[in-house]
Image: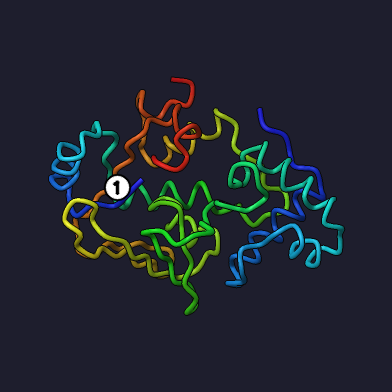
Amino acid sequence: MRLFRSEEHVQRWSAAKGIPLGAVFSVDALWMLARRWFHDRLSPSWRRRTMEEAHADFAHASLTGPFWRLDG
Amino acid sequence: MTMSLPTFDSTVRLAIQRAFIDGRPTPTPTSIGRDVGAGVAEVSAAFDRLADGRVIVLTAGTRDIMMSAPFAAQPTDFTVTVAGRAHYANCIWDALGVAAMMNADADVRTRCPDCGLPLAITVRSGAATATPAGCVAHFAVPAAHWWPNIAFT
């Protein structure tokens, strides 16, 4: 889960390393996901997300499709 | 369905996070025992339960914390500075997670894995801005396979 200069850099790195391309998305979406995922981490009542909750968090950041399925 | 943590485990979990937030050495059952007023054996058992529940990651065969998301116990390519204190995160998601968890302004620093260019994300008043503009996140491993690949995603 890394940050790249642009999608072109992801593609070049992927080809050079022989690592299949995964999901590429904007910093805005990443920030939405991070806020949704971590905002409650310091709450005493925090617990790990259920699969359904995790999928909802991904969808909140417009991250949908087979890549984002925990039951895939 | 995930269950709420037992109260003691929740106390230990929060004490671990607080140690990272405060920039103290990586917490151990001994240091957390001091923090929460409990014995080492009791805290060690909580460490094991938290690891079994995938709340923290321990180095195999030890009670040495490797990860307590969003924090990394060892230096990584992802640094997050909040209120003048630098932290290591496990990945770019976790790096922004530090800012989100602490609900604070933050400066994230990493490098492009392709070209080595320094990249930054600045969080101010709840908004994140990348420098240079146009940076993108890449997750290599599909969500269903994150946990078996926790050290490489």
Q: Please, is residue B69 above or below residue B147 in the view?
A: below
**Residue at image coords 22%, 54%:** B135
Which quarter of the rendered picture does the C terminus of chain B lie within? Answer: top left
Identify the residue at the far front of this view.
B61
- In the rendering, at what x and y percent does residue B104 appear? 50, 68
Q: Secondary structure at mark 1?
A: strand
**Residue at image coords 55%, 54%:** A39
Identify the residue at the far bottom of this view.
B84
**Residue at image coords 44%, 62%:** B75
| Chain letter, disc 1 residue | B
The answer to which of B44 and B23 lies nearer the viewer is B44
- In the rendering, at what x and y percent does residue B17 appear? 63, 60
The residue at which mark 1 appears reads as: B137
The answer to which of B137 and B57 lies nearer the viewer is B57
**Residue B115 picture quarter:** bottom left
**Residue B21 picture quarter:** bottom right
**Residue at image coords 75%, 57%:** B29
Identify the residue at the far top of this view.
A72
Residue neighbourhood size for the residue with mark 1, other residues' Cα within 10 Å, grouped as few (<14), some (14–19), many (≥20)? many
- In the rendering, at what x and y percent does residue B36 appear? 81, 63
Say whether residue A64 is left or right of residue A8.
right
Q: Please, is residue B94 above or below residue B61 in the view?
A: below
